[in-house]
Image (tube, rainbow, N blue to C red):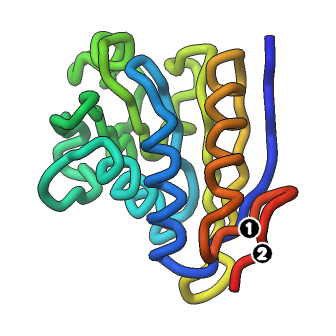
């Protein structure tokens, strides 16, 4: 099993969105990305970048009240927000496992609320507010595919304005 962890920093919401777009360019159907962090940390901003890279049209917002929104793009994007769920059993009501195991990219905001329900191989992004718009993103891969995804994403972010990654360029 290959696992990878690193921390990146972004200096603005635009840079966070660009990092999300770089992730969107690297994901494949079947990938599962967990987005964690306080309210306002940038989870949805990352999701917007991913959606943009996948060719999703329209504005992407957090599915807090819908819990799940599936967007059409070059690859389907299943965008979950599990904040309002209280028990893992409620995941059955939204066919969580059927969707996650399907032919889509799954972005799961607040996925850390139900770790027992997650697949074994996930990429976890923990976003932390470090300033008005700046963010620290701790990246952790738990398996072979997520490790490869993390490595590809780190390389893609190394050249982005406003994004600092290990071995890459510092924000301006």
Give the residue at x 43% y 45%: 109
Give the residue at x 62% y 43%: 153
Callout 1 touching callout 2 (CB < 8 Å): yes
Compared with residue 158, is residue 99 higher up or lower down, i.e. above or below? above
Q: Which residue is mark 2?
A: 170
Q: Position of residue 149 (x, y in %)?
A: 62, 31
Looking at the image, residue 120 sits to the left or right of residue 80; the answer is right
Give the residue at x 71% y 31%: 141
Residue 130's image quarter? bottom right
Q: Position of residue 168 (x, y in %)?
A: 80, 61
Q: Position of residue 1 (x, y in %)?
A: 80, 11
The residue lying toward the viewer, choosing from 130 and 15, is 15
Q: Which residue is mark 1?
A: 164
Q: In the current view of this chain or complex, which residue is farthest to the front?
A: 159
Give the residue at x 19% y 50%: 65
Q: Position of residue 136 (x, y in %)?
A: 69, 66
For disc 1, the neighbor class at 10 Å (few under 14, some 14 to 19, many from 20) is many
The residue lying toward the viewer, choosing from 120 and 7, is 7
Give the distance between the C-alpha atoms of the residues marked 1 and 2, in whole angstroms.
Answer: 4 Å
Compared with residue 6, is residue 169 higher up or lower down, i.e. above or below? below
């Amino acid at each position: 099993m290959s696992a990878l962890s690193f921390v990146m920093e972004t200096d603005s919401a635009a840079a966070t969105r660009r990092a999300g777009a770089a992730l969107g360019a690297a994901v494949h159907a079947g990938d599962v990305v967990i987005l964690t962090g306080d309210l306002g940390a940038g989870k949805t901003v990352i999701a917007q970048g991913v959606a943009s890279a996948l060719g999703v049209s329209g504005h992407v917002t957090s599915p807090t009240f819908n819990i799940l929104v599936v967007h059409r793009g070059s690859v389907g994007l299943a965008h979950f927000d599990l904040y309002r769920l209280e028990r893992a059993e409620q995941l059955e009501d939204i066919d969580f496992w059927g969707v996650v195991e399907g032919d889509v990219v799954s972005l799961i905001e607040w996925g850390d609320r139900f770790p027992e329900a997650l697949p074994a191989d996930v990429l976890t992004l923990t976003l932390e507010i470090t300033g008005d718009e700046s963010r620290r993103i701790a990246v952790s891969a738990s398996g072979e595919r997520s490790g490869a995804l993390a490595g590809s994403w780190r390389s893609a972010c190394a050249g982005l304005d406003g994004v600092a990654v290990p071995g890459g360029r510092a924000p301006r």
